[in-house]
Amino acid sequence: MGISTSDKPFITRVKEDEADHFMRAAVAKAQDAQFIKRTQARRELGNWNEWRDLAEQIRQHVLKYLPDYLEEFADNVEKQDGHVFFAKDEDEAHNFIKELAIAKKAKNIVKSKSMVTTEIDLDKTLLSIPGANLLESDLAEFILQEDNWDEPTHIVFPTLHKNRDQIQREFQKLGYDGDDDPQHEARFVRGYLRKYFMKADFGITGCNFAIADNGMINLDTNEGNADITMAIPKTQVVVMGMERIVPSMKEAEVLDNMLARSAVGQKLTTYCTFTGRKKGGEVDGPDDFWVVIVDDGRSKALGTEFEPILQCIRCGACMNVCPVYRQVGGKGYGSIYPGPLGEVLSPILGGYEKFKDLPYACSLCAACTETCPVKIPLQHLIREHRIVEMDGKHMDHSMTNLILKMVGKGTQSPFLFGSAMKMAHPASNMFSQTEQPGAVEGMYDEGKIDYVPKIVPKLIHGWIDTRDVPRPVKAKENFRHWFKDHKPEEMAPVVKKEGGHAND
Amino acid sequence: MDNQPRVCIFSSCLVDLLFPNVGKAMVQVLERLGCKTFLPKKQVCCGQPTYNSGYSKGSLKTFKNEIDALLSIDADYIVGPTGSCVFMIKEYAGILADDPVYGPRAKKLADKICEFSQFIYRVLGIIDCGAELDATITVHRSCHMTRLLGERTAPFVLLDHVKGIKRVPLHNVQLCCGFGGTFSAKEPELSTAMVQDKVKNIMDTKADILVGMETSCLMNIAGYMNRHGDHIKVMHIAEVLNHDVDPSRIKYIKDTNEPVVPANGEGVF
Amino acid sequence: MTSLLDQANNKDNREQFLNRIAKAAGRPRHALKDHPFKPLNTLPDDLLADKSPEELLNIAIKNSESVNAQVVLKPAAQLADFLTAYAKQENISHLLLPNNTPEEWEKYGLMEWSKNPGVENVAVWSDKLSRQENEENANQADLAVGMGDYLIAATGTVTVINRSAQGRGFDYLPTRLLLIVPKSGLVKSTREAVNKYNEQTANGLSTSTFNFISGPSNSGDIEMELVVGVHGPVECTYLIVEDR
């Protein structure tokens, strides 16, 4: 399954989500709350755009010298008796970890939230080991697991689509007898999972940043589950996307601050931990420390116009500002990476065939680009995907394709456009209504077009099904005609006195 | 007067086809403010409908036609009533960077072109256009103008100096109205849901007039309102700044105590 | 079939991977040594650099409280009484302490208290006990009183390291965590704390973990409503020692 969460066509998913009123209200509420928190947190830090410049520089530098930094990191892990495995794809990554779990005779595996482990389908692989148990320890991931491995819909708030009552009902199956207060539900999970934690023998975490110069792993969490996952089990596996590396703790620290402010509007996550294999004299922590560094398609972006997507630090701010995500929620995207990040990343990791619709699920409003703490030009990359799909792969064979090609012809020729300006008014006659005054003033002086037969392509009726279009003006009343004959407006006295040109 | 700024009007295809009043208002305001205007006949469209849909190659001729047309006038500035299309034209320089002929021409064009309100406020240095409009308004800001062109304050400053205007803030002003060019036609379900939210927020302001800086967004929002019987008046900023003008009220920023507000306002978060 | 596990720490596995991605990127390997990272600005070092120590302390307190940490300031001479009273007030029945040296306790005048803190069950995290015993003790504890290194003003954070006398489980498993941190450990920012740890490491400090802890554990996973106290401690107190 990999990053894909649905086999349904994109439009079906959109319609399902439109009908899901709870989900839409929850997402809207979350976006609005995060808008305030995020903006305050960034404002309070000060010089936000200069911080972004620094974060961008760190990420771009690391990508430019990625093999060197990975080499340095791996050397440092190995020096401390840790183990590093480089996995080129999903299969190598999850098979390696499965083999390791079997070799270690793992019985009680505990995981903390990590997008890359979801991406490589690790849970399903581990569950196929006879006699092994597995629990997700992040509250949201635990909720998803208990709901028969439901798919996450946000990279920071995976259960944004679920409400407290649904969660209460799920927990009742585990023996919860409390009410639907999130505080009580969370405390129940604390007790439930603590028992499991205490006997966990195999821990799996993701990695926010790997520190090249000391071989440590930097993790940011609020619940403390990742830290317990790294304290109790004797074997720990860290799974990291290969791009998630920084030169030293100094650069990690910069990104930790920006991640927390961007993701949840906090100054820092409650636990920001730099950690590695247990050292001499220490009592707990992993005796056995394994790092699995995963490519899984990321290298396809290296050296291309899409390389900036690898700057991503997974804060989720882009989906928190996205007006399309607001409407469809995470599920609509059909990828574990939803929102603007997902629109760029999913076709790279999962292929254009599977995710060809995603780059079009975007109005190019650029809210994502504006909010991105590491300055990924998201809306630009989304448009680059469209160019690859249309010009490179010729993936659209519908009427839309034909119409847009005609529009291309029409807009390159002053002659054709001149004809259009003449013909648009009479041509729209059969669809136009002029009698009824419109509700909106100032738009429909020439009448409106509010109906076209269903037979016309979606590109046209999709608009007119829900919105009126003003009727084109008569050639004699159009702007160009007016301009040709107009008498220039008299210059204002103050302007005359000044000589017109303020900047001269 | 010889030192009148020579302004080439970039009309945009929507003004040419649907919204003549916006073009007229823009020209009248600019002339009143001392500009000599020119309208090149061969201009058509900035090319966003095709380029933003992924047809890069198919848009090149559109770009080149627009470059030739807009540079056919020896003007000091090129001014258009839409931040979105102006930004597209600024992007030509990057897209055509490797073209020995059109690359440099695109760069020249990018240096000269401005959005209408930005031109008045930042280039002409005018803070009050002398207009009067006795109404409560709310403003839909344009995504491309604020985020890509980076101009988020000039239109608000100019509108706030229109005599008689009372401006009500629009809740969630930062959210896109759902137009997005061909997005609104290719993904009508998503686009409609977005415009629905936008319309609700606008109607909640109880404003008499919705003012916008883009005819495209206004067409989308008004299109939904008109279909659903929401009563409001819609105006482009050029029409507002051209409304009931008393030329003696026109003011330069430097003749007031007001500082020039930076384009990104209090910063972008 | 060869085991994938043999591929870990294997030169071929590493070289193939790194060569492949270098080729994909179209950039040569081993160019970093001539292009080390040089930050384009000094913002992380400049953060709160213009604040006086008093201002920094106030910022630290405000930010700590904003992450739901309880902040208490006391001179060393009053720590013992405070801790005894606190344990009583919270009805603590299982207390966990670090295996500090007498000098470490005495620095804060807590040697006597550590021997007789007035709580029914007292356990000490120590490398003399088994791993499991330590973890069980921590799991039972309704309060752990441990040592912090730095108090970070900008983020309301106290930092701790993993050591034989105070392990990871010490900080994460008890119901309540109280960290004693000297006022001299007050730093401006996470950057300054990282710099200090880097200096200590250069001078021989060896630890597997630097923990930056900001308040009690929490989550917003259910309808984004803040819930304090999830997997880690449900309460967190910073005890700042004014005269140390």
Image (cartoon, coloured by chain):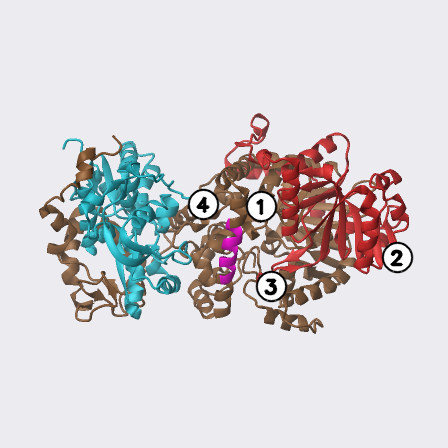
Chain colours: A brown, B cyan, C red
| Front disc: 1 or 4 | 4
Horizontally, residue B191 falls left or right of residue C174, namely: left
| Mark 2, residue position | C121
Vertical relation: A411 (above or below) C219: above
Q: CA distance from mark 2 to mark 4?
A: 54 Å
State the image coordinates of residue A120 (x, y, percent, origin top left): 60, 54
Q: Nearer the viewer, mark 2 or mark 1?
A: 2
Q: Position of residue A398 (x, y in %)?
A: 33, 60
Real-space Cα distance between discs 3 and 1?
Answer: 32 Å
Q: Residues within 10 Å of mark 1 (few under 14, many from 20)?
A: many
Q: Chain of mark 4?
A: B
Q: Earlier in the sequence, mark 3 or mark 2?
A: 2
Tell me where residue A139 sits by quadrant: bottom right
Q: Which residue is mark 3?
A: C222
How far, Cα to Cα, is label 2 from label 1? 50 Å
The relative height of residue A168 versus residue A200 in the rendered view (above or below) is: below
Instruction: Determine if marks 2 and 4 fall on one subunit.
Output: no
Looking at the rendered structure, the kind of residue marked 2 is Asn
Query: What's drawn in magenta, residue-wise?
Result: A29-39
* Residue A254 shows up from this direction: yes
Against A10, residue C184 (above or below) is above
Q: Are marks 3 and 2 on the same chain?
A: yes
**Residue shown at the point (32%, 56%) measured from the top left:** B166
Q: Is residue A32 magenta?
A: yes
SS for dot 1:
loop
Residue type marked 3: Ile
Residue under label 4: B268
Sort mark 2 into few (<14), some (14-19) or many (20+) by Cα contacts within 10 Å. some
Disc 1 target residue: A295
Nearer to us of marks 3 and 1 is 3
